[in-house]
Image (spheres, grey):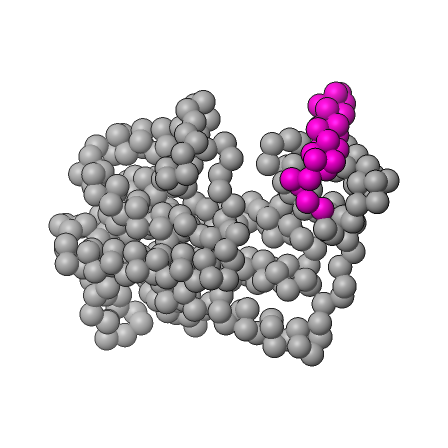
Amino acid sequence: MSRTFSPAPSHDVPPRNRFPLLDVLRGVALVAMAIYHFTWDLELFGYLAPATATTGALKWFARAIAASFLLIAGFSLVLAATPTLEWRGFLLRLAKLVAAAAAITAATLYAFPDSVITFGILHHIAFASLVGLAFLRAPVALVWLAAVLAFMLPQSGLETHADWIAFLGLDPSPPPSNDFVPVFPWLGWSLAGMALARLWQALRRDTAPTLHGPLSRGLMWLGRRSLAVYLVHQPVLIAGIWLVSQAFPPAKPDAAAIFGMQCRAACGQSFDANACDVYCACVSQRLTDMGVSLSETDASDASVQSVIQTCTAAMTATP
């Protein structure tokens, strides 16, 4: 989010150092985020099959939204530092981000103790804001190089396994979380946003496009209140869906279908779709033959572990 300045006297004259198009793009990202979280909430309440929001096209939709927020945050940091960084405004914004991130962690610790958000999008933006200070006056080529390295580091073979540094994103088995945006590779998007802002300033200097119309003004309104919108939208969506569920409860889910979706989602983290189809069909059939309920499967049970090992061998042996 960019710096906050005194409001302009009209919609046609943006505040000083304000980039209206950036506010519009931030508003678009917020709308996209609300759409994605709506599908996530529908899954949570049982209106959509398990893993719907975390697999396939929706998985990539979520990643694109996160990338857009980080690009915009990097771009905004450069604008806020032009011509010089106003430290009071920067530290106030950072304090708000840290407080909001801590509130998200506390809320999810209470509501979702098995998938707490310990380093989500707000945590990352706060962290990236501090890292970005080191690149504000660096040569643009160096900023691009740092962005590329951040993108590539998770593929370098370097691994960490300690829980206290899981936020770096170098653990091949990241902690379960409803929103995990680790330092690598995601820092690359923030740095890329900074490099793009520097390029824009070199090409366009202080000019910014003027936007008109109710849609643009609405999106700008959202974009200039992005933190508040982020914090409020999920409670509103969840409350709304809960109210609807009281009158129109979701259909009772099919245990086999749920097991299949969850199995493919977990398997898909390491193997391709065809291999996961083989593996999940094998596990489902063997557990059913053993009389084990698919809705109450305990992965730590010795007999279930034996099935997992057998079906993993069958999957890896399949050409």
Q: Position of residue 79 (x, y in %)?
A: 24, 51
Residue 286 among those drawn in magenta? no
Q: Which quadrant: the N terminus?
A: bottom left
Residue pushed farthest right?
Answer: 289
Pick the residue in front: 111 or 296.
296
Closer to us: 209 or 129: 129
Residue 286 in picture, x, y percent from top left: 82, 37
Magenta stretch, main secondary structure, is helix
Q: Tell me: residue 173, above or below residue 100.
A: above
* Residue 116 appears in the picture as rendered: yes
Q: Is residue 181 left or right of residue 50?
A: left
On the question of residue 183 being in view, the answer is: no
Q: Position of residue 219 (x, y in %)?
A: 42, 66
What x and y, as percent, mark residue 6?
20, 70
Q: Which quadrant: the C terminus?
A: top right
At horizontal 65% and vertical 40% (from top left) the residue drawn is 300
Residue at the far bottom in the pictured view: 247
Residue range corresponding to the magenta coloring: 297-319
Side of 213 where 113 appears, left or right: right
- The structure residue drawn at horizontal position 14% and vertical position 54%, both measured from the top left corner, is 87
- The image quadrant of residue 101 is bottom left
The residue located at (80%, 40%) in the rendering is 287
Which sits in the foreground, 84 or 313? 313
Residue name at image x 64 percent, y 75 percent? 244
- Count of numbered marks: 0
